[in-house]
Image (spheres, rainbow, N blue to C red):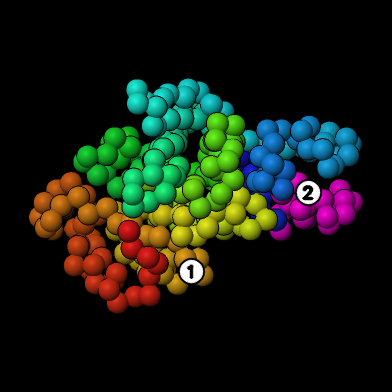
Amino acid sequence: MTNSIFEKNKKDLKEFLEKKGEKPYRVDQIWRSMYVDLYENFNDISTIPDNLKKSLTSELDYSPLSLVVKKKSKDLSTDKFLWKLHDNRLVETVLMRYDEDGHRRKRRTVCISSQVGCALDCKFCATGQQGFTRQLTVGEIVSQVVEVKRELLKEEPNLIKDQNNLNIVFMGMGEPLANYERVIDSIKILNDQKGLNIGARNITVSTVGLLPKIIELSKEKIQVNLAVSIHAPDNKTRSETVPINKKYPLEAVSYTHLTLPTKRIV
């Protein structure tokens, strides 16, 4: 795990600050600085004293991500971010811009990664061909959104201040449901009303069909969207390109959608 402050949830942060003799209100001040003000380092936080800034800087890292390269598509609709992690592994995040089309409002979608590599070996997927390296931490997942949202606020502050114009999709590198606990913890932080405040209906978890985890997700008290990547109309074809289909075939995944109180299917 990284030593980033973004690895701490509110409870962790409260315990960390209590050991330093800090008052409970410091938790909300720092949380807001990370997820609302989107400051880039501890020294930017104007609501805490200098001695606490120095203490945080000496004991914790700030963002767990380091930007390697950012590339923009020719039509300027898509940005790709390549991040280096603390162990020099690389992951990507994609920002997609959509204009109003008569059916949906103008919006921005951030496609985030949940793993370094992937073990599911889908034949069409470049990440799957790399094999699995490790799970991303909560901080590494959430920080992708923080970094991209900070960029968007510089470019389009009026658009992004309305949270309904920002969507998050767990559809980058890795199978999100194979990193279940960290993805759920990340969603709770993304959805926190005193932080990023991204509505659950603006968050989509994409999966190739890990059936036990779909069932588990259906029981969570978070109303996120669920997207299932089908890729083929029949089991024979799908099993050739999505090997997990041999274990959890289309019929089983489809039946689960119809019979469980699952999240909204997109």
Query: Can you say which quadrant of the picture contains the N terminus?
Result: top right
Q: Which residue is drawn at the image coordinates 11% and 51% (left, top)?
A: 237
Residue 235 placement (x, y as % from top left): 13, 58
x and y, in percent, of residue 206 in the image:
36, 53
For disc 1, the marked residue is: 220
Label 1: element kind: loop
- Asked if 102 appears above or below 45 in the picture, the reply is below
Crowding at dot 1, Cα within 10 Å, few <14 / some 14-19 / many 20+, comes out as few
Q: On the image, which quarter does residue 40 sit in?
A: top right
* Magenta residues (range): 11-31
Rendered image quadrant of residue 257: bottom left
- Whether residue 224 can be seen here: yes
* Residue matched to label 2: 29
Residue 24 within the magenta-colored segment of the rendering: yes
For image coordinates 61% across by 50% down, the residue present is 196
Q: Which amino acid type is shown beneath numbered disc 2?
A: Gln
| Separation of residues labelled 1 and 2 (CA atoms) | 29 Å
